[in-house]
Image: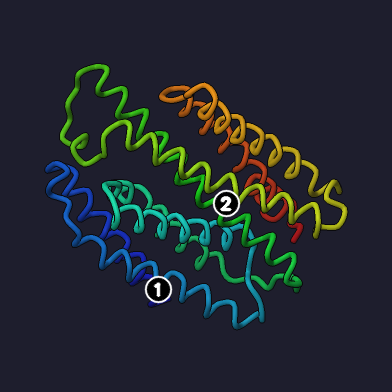
Amino acid sequence: MTIVLIAAALYLVSSGLLAAGVSKGGGAIGRHWLWPAAGAIALHALDHALAWRAPGGADLHFFAALSLVGLGMAVLTALYGATGRMAALGVVVFPLAAASLLGYVLHGTEASAPLDWRLQLHAWLALLAYAALAVAALLALMLWAQERALRRREFHGWLRALPPLVELETLLFRTVAVGFVLLTATLLTGVLFVQDLLAQQLVHKTVLSVLSWLIFGGLLLGRWRRGWRGTTAVRWTLVAMALLVLSYFGSKFVLELVLGVA
């Protein structure tokens, strides 16, 4: 529990440093937030690794999966912030990562059924896809907020903490593209390795995941062929992500927490 509390505290320290920098304008952010963020990410990953040793395998139940997605989002945010001008994303992502880790630990570790390497590959690809596309959804919200402020000529200080509109939009589509590739690999490994993919417990997950994949693919195609951007990009990114959340975490919530099916 000590590792978790330290990790959560470091996430919040990093988020606080970023929030203070954003409130003063983009130039005040600097890189001092990166060290507590890196420490939090390392401890977050270590807690999962230590917990998995007890049951003899990776715990991929609802709260564990949620925590792993939070970890993936934190890693992407740290990378984006360290190499560009998207550190402000950590103001939102790092508290979410801390909350997901605390939820996982408070709920307790559960032993998962043994999975062979093929199903483990499918599961890890899914978690990576959800992390990347969740970051894309947050970028879409930031793009919407930036466009709205500029359209209303409301030049808030936090605008200086964000990259130019075109750069933010480009980063959004790049993130969607990465998530789409991972989601494609997830669906392919599901078709190849998951037995009875259309069983009663999996049919909703499969259908919603495919719908989300189609929307993300259509968005990327529209960007390439018709130059879609702005509100269109934001709307379809959020719709596709909502379907993806319902497909995986919605299904797991109902099955594991409501019906008690492992």
In the displayed structure, 97 sits above or below 110; it is above
Instruction: Report the residue marked by disc 1.
Output: 43
User: Which residue is depicted at the point 86% across and 48% down?
Assistant: 199
Colouring of the image: rainbow
Of the image marks 2 and 1, the number of the one nearer the N terminus:
1
The amino acid on which the numbered mark 1 sits, given as a three-letter code, is Leu
Point out residue 186 in the picture as x, y percentages from the top left corner: 68, 53
User: Which residue is depicted at the point 33% across and 31% down?
Assistant: 166
Q: Quick check: 80 left or right of 33?
A: right
The amino acid on which the numbered mark 2 sits, given as a three-letter code, is Ala
Point out residue 188 in the picture as x, y percentages from the top left corner: 74, 51
Instruction: Report the residue marked by disc 2.
Output: 129
Crowd class of label 1 (few under 14; some 14 to 19; many from 20; radius 10 Å): some
User: Which residue is depicted at the point 57% across and 63% down?
Assistant: 64
Name the mark on residue 15: none
Residue 147, by quadrant, is top left
